[in-house]
Image (cartoon, rainbow, N blue to C red):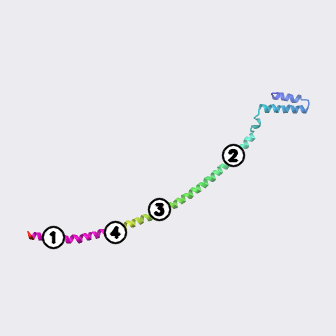
Amino acid sequence: MSSSVALYEALTTAPDDRTRARVIAEAFERLEERYPHLPDLATQGHVREAELRLQKEIEQVRADLRATELRLQGEIEQVRAELKIDIEHLRAELKADIEQIRADLHATELRLQKEIAHVKLDLLKWLVPLMFAQVAAIAALVKLL
């Protein structure tokens, strides 16, 4: 009985229900022997069910990805705001330091100008008497000669 026609003939010629049941059981047994992977085959329903389950999981992953993306965007914005505050703080500190350096530079410049004026005055104190002494010495030399 390797074909459907042979199965049909065996069923129609069987004298009682018990023999028919045996013929059907033997047919199933041969079918299972011929196709041992038959219980593992997926039907259209199984494939559709798996497809729907995968689509649901894909949508869940997409939703999780969107939530993660939104969370990360929020964290990025928070870090940007913190960096802005830090940058403004550093700018203020730099401005204060620059102003302090300018004030120190101006004070140093004024002190140097005072010292230069004092040195000029000291030089004049020494040069003027020395010039008069030179003129007197030259006049004395001229009289002697």
Disc 3 to disc 1, how far (Cα)? 64 Å
* CB within 8 Å, label 3 to label 2: no
Give residue 91's mark: 3
- Front in this rendered view, residue 32 or 70: 32
- Mark 4: give few (<14), some (14-19) or many (20+) Cα within 10 Å: few
Classify residue 105 as left or right of residue 132: right
Dot in front, 4 or 2 = 4
Q: Position of residue 53 (x, y in %)?
A: 71, 46
Queried whether the magenta region covers residue 135, the answer comes back as yes
Q: Which residues are magenta?
A: 114-142
**Counting residues from the N terminus, which is met first, the one under dot 3 or under dot 1?**
3
Disc 4 to disc 2, how far (Cα)? 82 Å
**Counting residues from the N terminus, which is met first, the one under dot 4 or under dot 3?**
3
Disc 3 to disc 2, how far (Cα)? 53 Å
Q: Quadrant of residue 74?
A: bottom right
The residue drawn where x is 29% and y is 68% is: 116
Q: Position of residue 29 (x, y in %)?
A: 82, 32
The residue drawn where x is 57% and y is 58% is: 78
Residue type (three-letter) at the residue carrying disc 3: Arg
Classify residue 30 as left or right of residue 128: right
* CB within 8 Å, label 1 to label 2: no
Point out the image quarter for the N terminus. Answer: top right
Q: Which residue is mark 2?
A: 55
- Front in this rendered view, residue 45 or 80: 80
- Mark 1: give few (<14), some (14-19) or many (20+) Cα within 10 Å: few
Dot in front, 4 or 3 = 4
**Counting residues from the N terminus, which is met first, the one under dot 4 or under dot 2?**
2
Give residue 111's mark: 4
Residue type (three-letter) at the residue carrying disc 2: Gln
The residue drawn where x is 90% and y is 33% is: 18
For the stretch drawn in magenta, the main secondary structure is helix
Q: Position of residue 50 (x, y in %)?
A: 72, 43
